[in-house]
Image: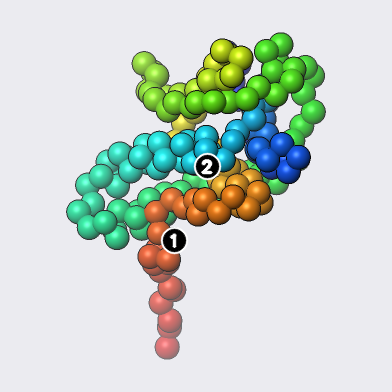
Amino acid sequence: MGDALHQMTAEYNPAEDRILFRVNTVEKTEYRVWLTRRLVRQIWGVAVQNFAAEPDVKEQERPQVKKAVLSMQHQEAVQGADFSQKHQKPDKAAAETEQPLLAINAELGKTEQGAIRLSFHTSAGRSINLNLNDEMLHAVCHILQQAADKAGWDLKLAIGDAARVITPTPAQLH
C-alpha cells in the first residue's frame, strides 16, 4: 500500500466472530482485513512491547512507574485522535481486498525511515503494510480494544495501568 493513510476503523462482526479492520487512504482506496481474536491478541502484545521500548518508559526503574508512563502516553495519543467520524465510503476497494482478506499473521517493525510498519499477512498469500507513527499505532490499539470489548472476547486489553495515573489537582486559593 503506497498511499498515505486517511482513516482506520475496526468493527466487530458477530456472524463472522471477527473484527473487520478497514483502512482508507487519501486516494480514497479501501483495504479490508478480517482479524481473529488470536491475531488481535498477537498485535496487542507486540504493540505494547513497542510502546515499552520507548526511552521515556524504558528509563523507568519501577514497574508501576513504567505502567503509569505507558498509560499516560496512550491516553495523550488517543485524546489527540478523532474517532468521531463514521467510516467514509471509499471510491474503490483495493483490488486485492474487494472481499475482506483473512489475516493469519501480523508483524510490527521499523522501516528504514523510522516509521512503524504494521504488516498483515493473509491466507491468500498477500501482505498489507501500514506505515504508522506512534500516535497512529496508539489509535489502532484503541479501535481494536473497543471492537474486542464489543465482541466480548474477554481479552482484557490495556496499555499500562490507568489506575496508577495521577492527575494533578489544581491548587486551591484561600
Residue 168 vertical placement versus 143 (above, below):
below
Is residue 58 shown left or right of residue 151?
A: left
Q: Nearer the viewer, residue 126 or 128?
A: 126
Q: How far apart are marks 2 and 1 (CA)?
A: 15 Å
The numbered mark, 2 or 1, whose residue comes first in the sequence reads 2
Residue 117 in view in this figure: yes
Disc 1 target residue: 162
The quadrant in which the C terminus is found is bottom left
Disc 2 target residue: 141
Q: Nearer the viewer, residue 130 or 28?
A: 130
Q: Nearer the viewer, residue 170 or 167?
A: 167
Determine the residue positioned at 68% across, 40% down. 17
Residue 93 vertical placement versus 20 (above, below):
above
Q: Which residue lies furthest to the bottom in this view?
A: 174
Query: Residue 140's x, y, as percent?
Result: 55, 38
Q: What element carries label 1?
A: helix
Residue 29 in view in this figure: no
Residue 5 vertical placement versus 79 (above, below):
above
Determine the residue positioned at 29% across, 47% down. 57
Residue type indicated by callout 2: Cys
Is residue 79 shown left or right of residue 86?
A: left
Residue type indicated by callout 1: Ala
Is residue 31 shown left or right of residue 135?
A: right
Quadrant of the rendered image containing residue 123: top right
Crowding near pointer 1: few (<14 within 10 Å), some, many (20+)? some
Query: Residue 173's x, y, as percent?
Result: 43, 83
